[in-house]
Image (cartoon, rainbow, N blue to C red):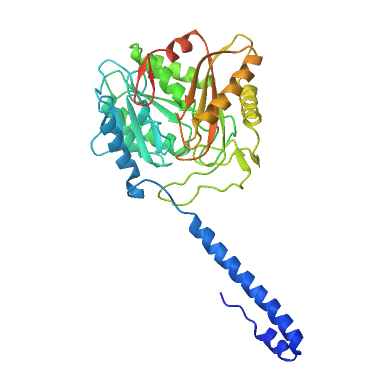
Amino acid sequence: MMVKITKVKTQIDTLDQPTRKKHFGAVGFFIGTLLALIFWHELMKEAIIVKKIINNAEQVVEEMLQGVVLAHPQYVKRVEGFNVLVRANSPVAGKVGLVSGGGSGHEPSHAGYVGKGMLDGAVAGAVFTSPTPDQVYEAVRAVDGGQGVLLIIKNYTGDIMNFEMAAEMADADGIKVAKVVVNDDVAVENSTWTTGRRGIAGTVFVHKIAGAKAETGAGLEEVQRVAEKVIANVRSMGMALSPCIVPAAGKPSFTLAENEVEIGMGIHGEPGTHREAIRSADETTEHLVDKILKDLPLAAGDEVAVMVNGLGGTPPMELYIINRKVAELLGKQQVVITKTFVGNYMTSLEMAGFSVTILKLDAELKELLLAPADTPALVQY
């Protein structure tokens, strides 16, 4: 940057010696300050360094899936040529197949839930990017055991469009396909990538309960009915303390001030309801639970399942502090917590934050929720 001081110099030449020294000092201070600000700006630009333990930003999904298969060959195998993982024993004859998926970056969703009692297949798009129709179609073909396939789709425009195209392709091949759309986020009605509510961590409960129903040998319509029942009774809301960095983008997905949080943040960094100064765990949790319960009224004696889900950068200590408050709030209403899940179930890369999910149970949903599951990310006996 060039600083023009010609005019200043001309004026200074006419001044006496003491005054000239004074003016030279002021100009020097100005230039020094300006240079310091320029240096600080450049330093801050350099400070935003992408620190990720990866090899190539364009290969993260491919290499991740290779690693999953190598770690869990008893659970999953790869559909050759596609970013699709299916059960190691797929297709399971006589059983409805369940396929879910979406953009990568939400691990362990969705590949971590492929296994007995949950999904038959998971489709991995690029990070925060919907999988292509041909990927979904190949997953459907790979898991079809003759009883049809249920697609479990989170409510994002790209996901719905591509999964529906895949369903049409499968139908043309004579494979029966049904679909459900998960929209559990109570934060906002419309967002960056959705019309209507977003699908977030409540999707894991759909995987679990619909998967358990499919294991009983139920038909496609019955499995779809149970999945829809879960969707009607599950609500979630989250918040974020910090952004994440998509490997290919190389920069934070959004910015927050040092003492600022985003309430109602989506799992791709979509805006929430508002930003505010960070509050205590109890205050923040109470706000989220209050929003959920306004949308999912509960009465004394009702049974629920609770999920306190980390977004990738929140330590277990903080998640358990949050869970303590959730249990207290539900206890005050004499709501019975049948089962609690605390951990990372649907993340947003390394985003710091959490979501709370509450699922209202009846006898059918309770039995299926508690049924056995054996997957890389969720084992239940």
Is residue 219 shown to the viewer in this render? yes
Query: In the rendered view, does 356 fall on the left or right side of 145?
Result: right
Splitting the image into 4 quarters, where does residue 303 fall?
A: top right
Q: Position of residue 214 (x, y in %)?
A: 36, 16
Rendered image quadrant of residue 100: top left
Residue 137, compared with residue 23, is above or below; it is above
Q: Residue furthest bottom?
A: 14
Quadrant for residue 318, please give it.
top right
Marker count (numbered): 0
Residue 278 in the image: state x and y as whole percent. 64, 39
Which residue is at 67% across, 74% downward?
29
Left or right of 73, for residue 313: right
Q: Nearer the viewer, residue 264 or 136?
A: 264
Q: Position of residue 360 (x, y in %)?
A: 54, 16
Residue 200 visible to the viewer? no
The quarter of the rendered structure image containing the N terminus is bottom right
Location of the C terminus (image quadrant): top left
- Comparing 183 with 309, the one in front is 309
Q: Residue at x 65, y 26 (%)?
A: 286
Residue nearest the observer in this picture, 364 or 146:
364
Q: Is residue 233 left or right of residue 93?
A: right
**Rendered location of residue 84, percent (x, y):** 30, 34
| In the rendered image, the vertical position of residue 58 relative to residue 234, given as above or below | below
User: Between 160 and 367, which is closer to the camera in this rendering?
Assistant: 367
Measured along the vertical axis of the image, is residue 164 above or below residue 366? below
